[in-house]
Amino acid sequence: MTANSNDKEKPLFGRPWIFIRGVPSMKFLPPEGPPEVAFAGRSNVGKSSLINALVGQKGLARTSNTPGRTQELNYFVPEGYSGEPGDMPPMALVDMPGYGYAQAPKEHVDAWTKLVFDYLRGRATLKRVYVLIDARHGIKKNDDDVLDLLDKAAVSYQLILTKTDKIKEPAVPKLMAETLEKIKKRPAAFPELIATSSEKGGGIDEVRAAIDLAIHQ
């Protein structure tokens, strides 16, 4: 289906979005075309909830209380574009498999990890990775490992604190300052942090603005 002119005049996050593909391995990736931004984070950090909040559709990205449910790279685009040359969507959102979940079978964890890392290293249309950090726990060892890989691959990334409604409000500025201090010497880190609550809607407009900036740079 081709988007009509009214659809294309709407703000990027004011249009309906659809799921187009789950990618279990690199060979199933969509052809490189529109810019992409991806969401990474520990299992159950709230990636799917954040994506749903960004597009204003509760059921777009599947959410679960079971860590490790997302096992593929899940692609979402605005509805109404054919994907043909001249009618490509303006961008794609990519929900990446969570990392740091040790209770799944080792071969599953290894497969997810390889898929994520291969994608980060090799996707030319990937404009930025948003690394989600649970505000209740801060940066963990496996978060640091992923940030190391992003730095090595020279993939631009920005940190997003999730679930800030789950901690006491006065603690948020302190946590943001501490987190920024931890990443200030990392070469690929975008030097701004966004605090969010998908449940309360906090920080969602800031993430939308950050995405808009990233895909137009």
Image (cartoon, rainbow, N blue to C red):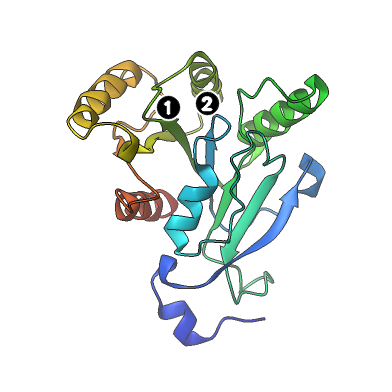
In the image, is residue 53 above or below residue 185? below
**Crowd class of label 1 (few under 14; some 14 to 19; many from 20; radius 10 Å):** many
Q: Is residue 30 in view?
A: no
Image-based side of 87 in relation to 27, left or right: left
Residue 213 disc label: none
Image-based side of 149 in relation to 27, left or right: left
Q: Where is residue 185, by image quadrant? A: top left
Q: Is residue 209 in view?
A: yes
**Crowd class of label 2 (few under 14; some 14 to 19; many from 20; radius 10 Å):** many
Q: Where is residue 38, by image quadrant? A: top right
Instruction: Name the residue at 70% across, 27% down.
Output: 113
Q: Quadrant of the N terminus?
A: bottom right
User: According to the image, label 1 marks what residue?
Assistant: 188
User: According to the image, label 2 marks what residue?
Assistant: 150
- Quick one: which residue is furthest to the left in this view? 170
- What is the C-alpha distance between the residues marked 2 and 1? 7 Å
Residue type, label 2: Leu
Q: How many marks?
A: 2
Q: Position of residue 39 (x, y in %)?
A: 52, 41
Q: Position of residue 153 (x, y in %)?
A: 56, 25
The one nearer the camera, 173 or 144, is 173
Give the SS element for disc 2.
Answer: helix
Image-based side of 201 in relation to 29, left or right: left
Q: Where is residue 77, by image quadrant? A: bottom right
Image-based side of 38 in relation to 68, left or right: left
Instruction: Name the residue at 35% across, 20% down.
Output: 183
Give the SS element for disc 1.
Answer: loop
The one nearer the camera, 169 or 35, is 169
Residue type, label 1: Ala
Q: Position of residue 95 (x, y in %)?
A: 59, 46
Q: Are marks 2 and 1 in contact (CB under 8 Å)?
A: yes
